[in-house]
Image: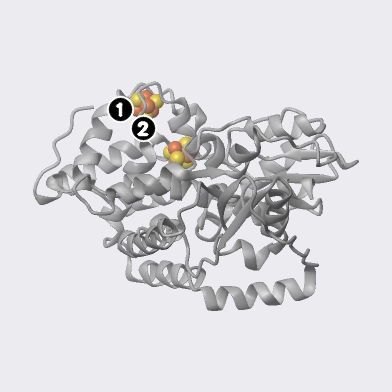
Amino acid sequence: METAIKGEFAKTLSGMKADSIIRSCVHCGFCLASCPTYNILSNELDSPRGRIYLIKSALEDNNFSKSSIKHLDQCLTCRACETICPSGVQYSQLADIGREFLEHKRPFWQKIYRNSVRKFITNPILFNAIGWMFRQSKTKVNSVLKLEKKNGKVLLLEGCVQPSLAPNINNNIKNILTKLGYEVITSKQSQCCGAIDQHLSANKQALVKIKNNINNWIKLDVDVIISSASGCGLMVKDYRLMFAENDKYYQKSKEISSKTIDIAEFLADKDLSLFKKQDVKISYQEPCTLQHGQNIAGLTHKILQKIGYQLTVIDDNHICCGSAGTYSIFQPKLAKKLRDNKLNNLQKNQPEIIVTSNIGCLMHLQKGTKTPVKHWTELLS
Ligand code: SF4
Ligand code: SF4
């Protein structure tokens, strides 16, 4: 697609990236069928190709309307379009650039509401207090084995919401890694990985958190950084894209991103015979951040099958469940429709437990069903 981004913005890192991404789109339209919002709303402007046109028009000629912001807000950033695109268009990076460009054009009340939600979610004191109350009423927390080093030293990213809302996930993973002979260092994240700020177009605030995390983690000198929340893992894997080559954080961000892997990638080649299959029928929900973002579709299925679980094929596995970071807060109707569709597909084989790889999907799906929803690693406890 031809493009002509003008002015000072064209010379910035974002401007140059946007130019190159827009040029890579050949407007073939293959992505339309894979897009959850196009499937529901049947409007080209709620498709990847339509949104690319909207962003191009805003960046080139400052030509946009209220509805441009609405169509960008309705995008889940699920990246299903990236998986299917034959030209390798990095749509999600362009969407972030377009959203940040249009952020200051929002009505005042929207800015206040979005900022309040962002500050609330990324405030560890408030969030931990709510998590503490949630745990008192619902969760029995498992104890953690004594940690010792044999095979190597790994950093387990605890995440900002996971320790509060579902502490057993991290505790179970620490126990699994310890049984496998690894020394586990945990990162008490006093702050988010930056994904929430980034999704809400507060890119400057995201960068502050990203730099802080890079500085803290690089000092630990671990072999591997493990994430068990696929949304956070994807964000940290993408740290390397946030800095220009002449930025002092460029090399450090590449090092952190290249060491970061999902827990499924870490366990894929390990001997898991220590862990016995539980006598329970499961369905697995594969988050978009794992299949379209981290490009490791099918890996968790293979591990679960190796342990002995029977997995049925889930219809529309590639379609988002509607969680998508803060999407379910700002787009509740679309998020609920996507969740209902996902749960219908997941529950066709009447599972006793639904398992997933991301805390956001877990909490979102659990709101729509009485069937317990857990992190898949809890099956190995
Ligand atoms: S599939 Fe890729 S190249 Fe084709 S219209 Fe969609 S984004 Fe553009
Ligand atoms: S990221 Fe997902 S919702 Fe957004 S345009 Fe691509 S497929 Fe559609």
Say few, some or many: other residues with alpha carbon within 10 Å of mark 1 (under 14 / 14 to 19 / 20 or more). many
Q: Secondary structure at mark 2?
A: helix
Q: Residue at point 40% right, 21% down? A: 86
Q: Residue at point 51% right, 52% down? A: 232
Ligand 2 placement by image quarter: top left
Quadrant holding the N terminus: top left
Q: Is residue 135 above or below residue 87?
A: below
Q: Secondary structure at mark 1?
A: loop
Residue to which mark 2 is pinned: 49
- Horizontal relation, residue 349 to residue 217: left or right: right
- The picture places residue 123, in percent across and down from the top left corner, at 49, 73
Within 8 Å: ligand 1 and the Cβ of disc 1? yes
Q: Amino acid at mark 2?
A: Arg
Residue 68, visible in the rendered structure: no
For marks 2 and 1, the one nearer the N-term is 1
The one nearer the camera, 22 or 251, is 251
Marks 2, 1: nearer the viewer = 1
Q: Which mark is residue 25?
A: 1
Q: Which mark is residue 356?
A: none
Within 8 Å: ligand 1 and the Cβ of disc 2? yes
> Distance of mark 2 from mark 1, alpha carbons?
8 Å
CB under 8 Å between discs 2 and 1: yes
The one nearer the camera, 367 or 268, is 268
- The picture places residue 104, in percent across and down from the top left corner, at 27, 62
Q: Amino acid at mark 1?
A: Cys
Residue 204, visible in the rendered structure: yes
